[in-house]
Image (cartoon, rainbow, N blue to C red):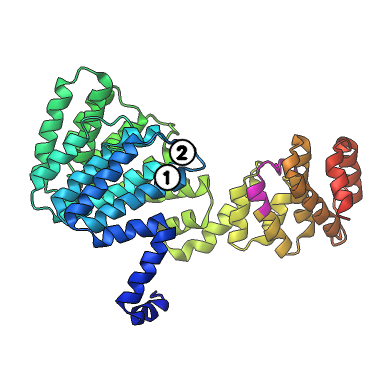
């Protein structure tokens, strides 16, 4: 959306805007830098970028985790200066490469536990590199730059340039890169460095959909293949269009293996779709639906078996959910989502001993849903679980929440008509006072809020 002030500023004329910018530059280093960028030639902007990068390397300042976001923004600004000031694609590529090669300096001068700095390399710098690369006619030179930067990757971010090769290089050039990387790997004696080159080969092989090369390289790199490797190989075969081979690799996963089960099942779902095996696809989708009831898993199942079976599927699953003894928040949320409020209330009342307040996120949403439906007993029992959890742990920072829950229980007590086999609120309150009465900071604050 266009800022309505833009036209008014344009109406002021160039002289007024120039004066305003120069006045602002007196107080703002960022404004002063912007002016220098706007009036500089391409050659001058290239030198400005190099000087800034050199100054960064000389800096002795350290940015802790609290300042990492600001440091990341400084790096983004540096890249924007480059983008705005350098039009020549090859020059731009070489300067972005220089930015990547400053990774040791950058990461040694900051605490990047937040990941902000890494994101600048993996996203902002990569996007700029691809933009220059798409406009550069010398594709072999682009490949040279990518491989030069990736001779080492001690901080795990330089491979971002290899991962985007398919966006800006033809397959013929990528094949040449693969040959050069394979020579590097064959001649490497250090195991860590060898693995690094093999990972790059895998990335390029996947981008050009050479599943056989990916498989061969993964076997060389890993030796005995764990479940994750089997899934990766299957995924690349599927992406390359070889559905049957992809399926054969998934079959190598030991029966009963739960590691990366979601990724495996997602691939199987795609494979059964492509094979037209509706029977296996239906069985898989039923399995996924029953392992985690949700509207999404229901939708996926109905897309295959027909939406006319929705009521029957929901009826059968509701019966199965109510028969189980173990409480699952996802089951309760599913019952609410499909409008089974009576069944949700019954489900909760039969499993009150399992309403663990430690899982407060899901319980709070259930409490809100039950209260909205005027199911005051069920709502009260959920809030009891939340309150008891806080008091049991003696987590003083959560006391304000516990007090809020107890106040909520005080109000709900007047609305509960039938307590069934559960203790009345007054009895429950006496019990928690008896068990946690020594937590005086809690009770004193509770009394103050009466």
Residue 132 covered by magenta stretch: no
Q: x%, y% of residue 198? A: 22, 29
Q: Residue at x 55, y 58 (%)?
A: 314
280 left or right of 164 in image: right
Task: Count residues near mark 1 (Cα–Cα under 10 Å), then give few for <14, some for 14-19, many for 20+.
Answer: many
The C terminus, quarter of image: bottom right
| 188 relative to 15, above or below | above
Residue 154, image quadrant: top left
Q: x%, y% of residue 353? A: 75, 41
Q: x%, y% of residue 123? A: 33, 48
- From the viewer's side, name the closer residue of 35 and 416: 35
- From the viewer's side, name the closer residue of 386 and 417: 386
| 404 relative to 247, above or below | below
96 left or right of 67 in image: left
Quickly name the residue at label 1. 71
- From this viewpoint, is residue 165 visible? no
Quickly name the residue at label 2. 63
Write down the region rendered in magenta. Answer: 353-364
Q: x%, y% of residue 361? A: 63, 49
The reply to whether the C-beta atoms of the residues labelled 1 and 2 are less than 8 Å apart is yes
343 left or right of 417 in image: left
Task: Count residues near mark 2 (Cα–Cα under 10 Å), then give few for <14, some for 14-19, many for 20+.
Answer: some
Q: Secondary structure at mark 2?
A: loop
236 left or right of 17 in image: left
- From this viewpoint, is residue 97 visible? yes
């Amino acid at each position: 959306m266009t800022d309505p002030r833009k036209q008014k500023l344009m109406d002021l004329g160039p002289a007024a805007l120039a004066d305003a910018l120069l006045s602002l530059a007196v107080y703002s280093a960022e404004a002063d830098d912007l002016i220098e960028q706007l009036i500089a030639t391409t050659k001058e902007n290239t030198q400005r970028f190099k000087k800034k990068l050199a100054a960064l390397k000389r800096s002795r300042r350290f940015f802790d985790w609290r300042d990492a976001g600001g440091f990341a923004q400084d790096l983004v600004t540096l890249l924007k200066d480059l983008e705005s000031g350098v039009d020549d694609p090859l020059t731009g590529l070489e300067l972005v490469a220089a930015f990547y090669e400053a990774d040791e300096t950058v990461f040694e001068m900051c605490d990047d536990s937040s990941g902000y700095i890494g994101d600048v390399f993996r996203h902002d710098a990569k996007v700029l590199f691809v933009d220059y690369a798409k406009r550069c006619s010398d594709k072999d030179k682009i490949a040279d730059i990518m491989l030069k930067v990736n001779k080492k990757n001690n901080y795990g971010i330089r491979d971002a340039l290899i991962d985007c090769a398919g966006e800006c290089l033809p397959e013929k050039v990528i094949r040449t890169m693969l040959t050069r990387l394979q020579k590097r790997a064959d001649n490497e004696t250090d195991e860590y460095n060898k693995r690094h080159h093999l990972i790059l080969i895998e990335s390029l092989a996947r981008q050009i959909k050479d599943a056989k090369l990916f498989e061969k390289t993964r076997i060389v790199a890993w030796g005995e293949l764990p479940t994750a490797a089997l899934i990766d190989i299957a995924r690349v075969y599927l992406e390359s269009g070889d559905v049957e081979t992809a399926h054969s690799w998934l079959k190598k996963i030991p029966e009963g293996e739960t590691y990366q089960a979601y990724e495996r099942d997602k691939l199987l779902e795609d494979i059964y779709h492509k094979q037209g095996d509706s029977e296996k696809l239906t069985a898989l989708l039923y399995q996924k639906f029953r392992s985690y009831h949700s509207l999404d898993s229901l939708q996926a199942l109905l897309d295959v078996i027909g939406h006319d079976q929705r009521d029957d599927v929901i009826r059968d699953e509701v019966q199965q959910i109510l028969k189980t003894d173990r409480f699952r928040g996802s089951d309760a949320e599913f019952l609410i989502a499909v409008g089974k409020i009576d069944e949700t209330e019954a489900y909760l009342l039969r499993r009150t001993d399992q309403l663990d307040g430690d899982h407060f996120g899901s319980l709070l949403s259930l409490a809100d849903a039950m209260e909205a439906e005027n199911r005051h007993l069920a709502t009260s029992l959920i809030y009891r679980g939340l309150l008891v959890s806080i008091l049991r742990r003696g987590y003083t920072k959560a006391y304000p929440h516990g007090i809020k829950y107890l106040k909520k229980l005080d109000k709900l007590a007047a609305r509960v008509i039938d307590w069934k086999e559960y203790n009345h609120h007054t009895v429950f309150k006496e019990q928690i006072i008896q068990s946690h009465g020594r937590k005086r900071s809690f009770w004193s604050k509770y009394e103050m809020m009466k």
